[in-house]
Amino acid sequence: MFIFTVYRIETCKTSIVADRIKWADSNICFSWAWAAEPKWRTASDLSKLIEKLTVYTPSSKNRDSWVWKFKSTNHYSSNSLANLLFELDTVNAPALEPTVLNTMNPQKIGIYMWRVKKYKVSVRSELDACGIDIHSTRCPVCNEDIETLQHILLTCTTAKDIWSRICKWWNLDVLNISNLTYLAKPHHPWFTTASRSSLWQAIVWASSYFI
Ligand SMILES: [Zn+2]
């Protein structure tokens, strides 16, 4: 996956491996043509790519070609990608709930929560890590901390105030919230039925979306 960040700064998107890399007497020489200097995550990804390439021995028998190694035919299909992502989800995060299945919420909220769980929300700390120039990484709401996902949804003063009001509305003790999964599953006798738990979950996720 790291190759995508490197591809983004390539000037000629149709270039092939032979345009950028030469092997001479078992030595590898790179001839990069970047649209922008690789930095932050891109620089780190480029190092990983170079690490892999330096131990790779090319074959002179075949021409360059694209191969999708996750399917026996080696041909890419969106269906095989969907299956791969589903398998990765199952292997890496078996405890994740099927967020999009809470039918009380519009689908956009389910998709947003899926992104939250994957840490794929464009908060300032993530943009900065991707090498995007932003004038500040601090939270624009309270200016007291770095704007991370954890901060905007849980520890920012505004978020805390919202969770506190929702808990009061539901006659719950104000929870010591450490993560959203905990917030969505409070240990309280009121949550004895699936429908009540689903309702609470829908409220928590809709609130997270609007925060
Ligand atoms: Zn804040």
Image (cartoon, rainbow, N blue to C red):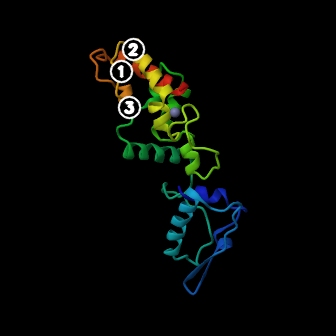
In the image, is 187 to the left or to the right of 56?
Answer: left
Query: Element type at marker 3?
Result: helix
Residue at disc 1, CB closer than 8 Å to ligand 1: no
Tell me which numbered mark, 1 or 2, is placed earlier along the sequence.
Answer: 2
Give percent across and percent down for residue 70: 48, 55
Q: Quadrant of residue 124?
A: top right
Q: Are marks 2 and 3 in contact (CB under 8 Å)?
A: no
Furthest residue to the bottom?
A: 25
Q: Which residue bears the numbered disc 1?
A: 174
Q: Are marks 1 and 2 in contact (CB under 8 Å)?
A: yes
- Which residue is at the front of the view, 86 or 104? 104
Distance of label 2 from label 3 (alpha carbons): 19 Å
Residue in the picture at 44% in, 32% down: 155
Q: Is residue 59 above or below residue 205?
A: below
Q: Residues within 10 Å of mark 2 (few under 14, many from 20)?
A: few
Q: Residue furthest left?
A: 189
